[in-house]
Amino acid sequence: MQYLVIAIIFGSLFAILFKIFQQRGIDALQAIGINYVVAFVIGMLGSVSQGFAVINIGSWLVPAIVVGLFMMLSFVTMNIATRSHGIAIATIAARVAFVIPVLCAYLFLQGEEPRWVASALVIASLLLIFPQQNGGKSDSQQWIQPLLVFACYGITNFFLKLSQQIVADAGGGDADLSLVTGTSFLSALLFTLLYYYLFLPRTQRTPLSWHNIVAGIVLGCVNVGCTYFLLKSLMVIDSGIFYPTYNIAIVTIATLVGRIGFGERLKITQYIGVAVAILAIILFFC
């Protein structure tokens, strides 16, 4: 149970940190890059300290690289959505993304059939929480950022679960988990560098500074802690207990922190969307 509590604490901090970065003028992309350096180093140290990995690297390498790509995209889209829509909306879009790995497992890994009513409620919650303008008509550009958060987090979770399952099926242990997460973080770092230097305009790049480095170190510690303790939780807690508790707790914390800590206001329909999202999470795993 302590793994679950720690995973919830770390998982709640991402959007909050990006909001703080915005207020403090921190270059979030630099912080994201430094975060993956820190996460990679910690992951490799964990692997070395626990002994050598025993499972075939080729079995999990491709899923780990894909995890890294979508980890990077998840952070970039989370940062953008948090700045434009607030902590609560960005976090809810990320948390209800659990429906994607469930559906993917059913379609591609012969997993259990998902609960379709709960899946429909997930979509309903997204429709309710996404911003609305012009007399209730949704602005399509306003929808893009939360939808990208939803998609990127969902795909990340699917390949993370796939990697964890490969390790478990092969009889791997903590050293293998650390190596998988470390490889994912290295992959995310490389994709972040590619994005920063190939796709970001020069006018949007800023010189590396100490406050960006410190922010990246903090983000990296939170990132590796969340990923590692999520994987550890899944190895000792049934997913039917873990996922609803984990996601409901994070949604609740993010909504409260956004409202109390940062003065973010939601419309009545968006609060209903929060409630519908929590209901969907409960029904999905009952």
Image (cartoon, grey):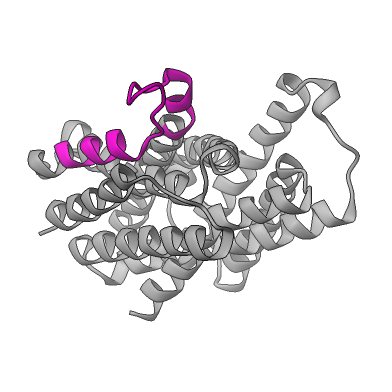
Q: Which quarter of the figure has residue 4?
A: bottom left
Q: Is residue 272 left or right of residue 167?
A: left
Q: Residue at x 23, y 41 (%)?
A: 122
Position of residue 139 measured from the top left corner of the image (x, y, whole percent): 42, 20
Q: How many marks?
A: 0
Residue 142 falls within the magenta-colored stretch: yes
Name the foreground residue: 256 vs 190. Answer: 256
Residue at (77, 48) in percent of width and height: 26
| Residue 226 on image: x %, y % | 49, 62
* Residue 130, magenta (yes or no): yes
Please identify the quarter of the rendering in which residue 155 is found. Answer: top left
For the C terminus, give its image quadrant. Answer: bottom left
Magenta residues span: 120-146
* Residue 53 seen anywhere in this rendered image of the structure: no
**Farthest residue in the bottom direction?**
2
Q: Quadrant of the N terminus?
A: bottom left
Residue at 26% across, 70% down:
237
- In depth, the one of 78 and 226 nearer the eye is 78
Q: Residue at x 27, y 45 (%)?
A: 273
